[in-house]
Amino acid sequence: MKVYQNEFGISSTKRTEVIDITGRVEKIVEKSGVKNGICQIFLTHATAGLILQEAESGLTRDIEKMIQKQFPKGAGYEHDRIDDNADSHLASGFIGQSEIIPIKDGEMMRGTWQSILVLELDGPRNHRRVFVTIIGE
Ligand code: ZN
């Protein structure tokens, strides 16, 4: 059994933004040399989210709009008294900050329409950290 860990940084240009990281995670899986096991992707942030979803441009805009609708900014939240980003924390908490994908024969077992998407919820940010742990053999 092998444990391989690696990380990379991403930046965002908007307050709410969908960022496709599939290719970068695939490179880490390849580098790990693990043929069968699992890949966990984890964000070290409380105002970003992680989902598996189709990266079609219309759908990513729909996702951004849905987040803004479900978690409107400045809707009288208590945390806004100190930080003005309660909506970002709430969206991040409900969406989640990690995913696990099986690895089989050296490839992630993603469905055709399951891209790995980071949801920036409090951008723009210069450095969002994506931490990847691969366990297997
Ligand atoms: Zn805050």
Image: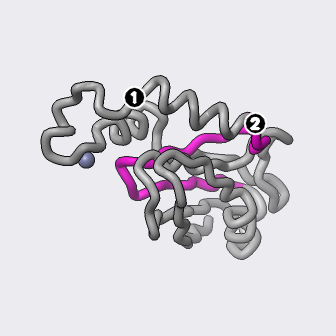
Q: Residue furthest bottom?
A: 31
- For image coordinates 56% across by 67% down, the residue present is 3
Residue 33 horizontal/vertical position (percent): 74, 72
Query: Left or right: 52 with respect to 49?
Result: right
- For image coordinates 58% across by 37% down, the residue present is 64
Residue 90 horizontal/vertical position (percent): 35, 34
Q: Which residue is mark 2?
A: 58
Q: Which residues are magenta?
A: 37-58
Is 50 part of what is drawn in magenta?
A: yes
Is 36 part of what is drawn in magenta?
A: no
Q: Which residue is mark 1?
A: 72
What residue type is disc 1 on? Pro
Which quadrant of the rendered structure holds the C terminus? bottom right
What residue type is disc 2 on? Gly
Q: Residue furthest left?
A: 81
The label number, if any, that marks residue 125 in the structure image: none
Compared with 27, 106 (above or below) is above
